[in-house]
Image: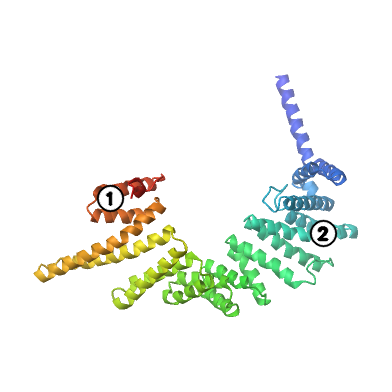
Amino acid sequence: MRNLMLSALVALLAVSTAFAQSGEDKMKEASKAYDNYNTNRDAVKLQEAVDAVMIAMEDPTVQADYKAYLEAGDIYAAAINQYVQDRTLANNEPIEPMVGRAAATAADYYMKAYNMADKKSAKKAALKGLETLQGNISNEGIYAIQDKNYEDSYEAFNKSVEVHEFLSSNDGESAFADDETKLNDERYYAALSAVLNENYDAAEPLFMALYESDYSDVGLYDGLYKVYSGKGDMESAGKYLQEGREKYPEETQLLFTEINYYLAEGKLDELTGKLDEAIAAEPENVSLYSTLGSVYDQLYQTNRAENPEKAAEYFDKAKENYEAGLEIQPDNASLIYSLGALYYNRAATMTNELVELGNDFSKEGQAKYEEMEEEINGVFDTAYPYFQKAEKTDPNNLNTLNALKEIFARRDNYDASNEMKARIEKIQAGEKIEKSYFEEQGM
């Protein structure tokens, strides 16, 4: 029993010693490692300093000492400086930093040290740390955007603006003091990062501050559109988009945003002109032909009953744009499918009319029925080779397989129809079709 109690006491003392080291002793350990790094530039020692100071700064005793914040700021500033050097050597390829958000954290520590310090020398040291750090706060934001880490890039660029304001308010020398454009760029990238992270509440005041200061950049209006459309306020989104288009009529960035706006609002008639404009600007952009073909396809469907003549015009324009896209990219599975679907949907709509004719049992009615049935089969036959080619291009496209299943059934080819059905079920179960049906059949 005595031995057990002694073992427990030793364990307790070990834990107590470890806890004691987690505060002031850890800070001493961090300082020693950092001094070693400054002497021989051994990155291993800097990593030791970072690891130790992370633990040290969690201790309330350490947190009460402004000197600790200055030391921690220096260590984190060295960490971001090392990361910038390593990143440069790596040709800007993503690499793991010693610690995340090093620059933003260093800035927080310097500002905390300044606010806590009771000596001018300490305050001056904190300001000097912030002044030296400014460039690397921006670098941290740039790297985070490149790595698509938008939460960190927002933090960095927002911190950059905060540091400028802190230095300006405390007689420090900010790098942006005489460069309002560069400062607004930092605000813009903070706002952009927030939008990319879908944090619209954070982005809105930043973009609005830029808007009110007449910030001259097409991205401002694109950002305002994304903020308000993301918040469901399409009226405001449309307002800023229209203003941007008037201010930057030649910018395709806003033109494409406007196209998305019209798509979201279902303004198909207005959309065709915008898409024609976009195609004129980017004639090799296949997706534009696909989108314009789809818009005309929808216009065809909505006008078919009330205005058959106009509907026929829309049908031809849909076909024309799909074919124009295929001239640029002949094996585009989406365009091939879209052409097949254009004919398939036309035949399917005609089938509804055929049902009505089936109720007329007169000789004349039956003749009309047979004539329309033949026409429908002809349209399905026109659609078939497009679906055949689409299936060869992408044998895992469910829309293509569903269309082929129905066409085969109409042709009384139930074996092929059942094969399409089996393939559909496999894909829906998470399997992948390795080879096209038509290639297997040698067709």
Comparing labels 2 and 1, the label whose residue is closer to the camera: 1
Q: Nearer the viewer, residue 151 or 350?
A: 350
Toward the front, the furthest residue is: 442
Q: Residues within 10 Å of mark 1 (few under 14, many from 20)?
A: many
- Three-letter amino acid code at the position of disc 2: Thr
The residue pinned by badge 2 equals 132
Q: Is residue 132 left or right of residue 96?
A: right
334 with respect to 211 (left or right): left
Residue at image position (20%, 64%) is 373
Determine the image quadrant of residue 326: bottom left
Quarter of the picture holding the N terminus: top right
- Secondary structure state at the residue bearing disc 1: helix
Residue 73 x %, y %: 80, 53
Q: Residue 207: image x %, image y %?
A: 63, 70
Q: Is residue 187 left or right of residue 393?
A: right
Eyeballing the image, is 396 above or below 294? above
Q: Which mark is residue 369?
A: none
Name which of mark 2 and mark 1 comes first in the sequence.
2
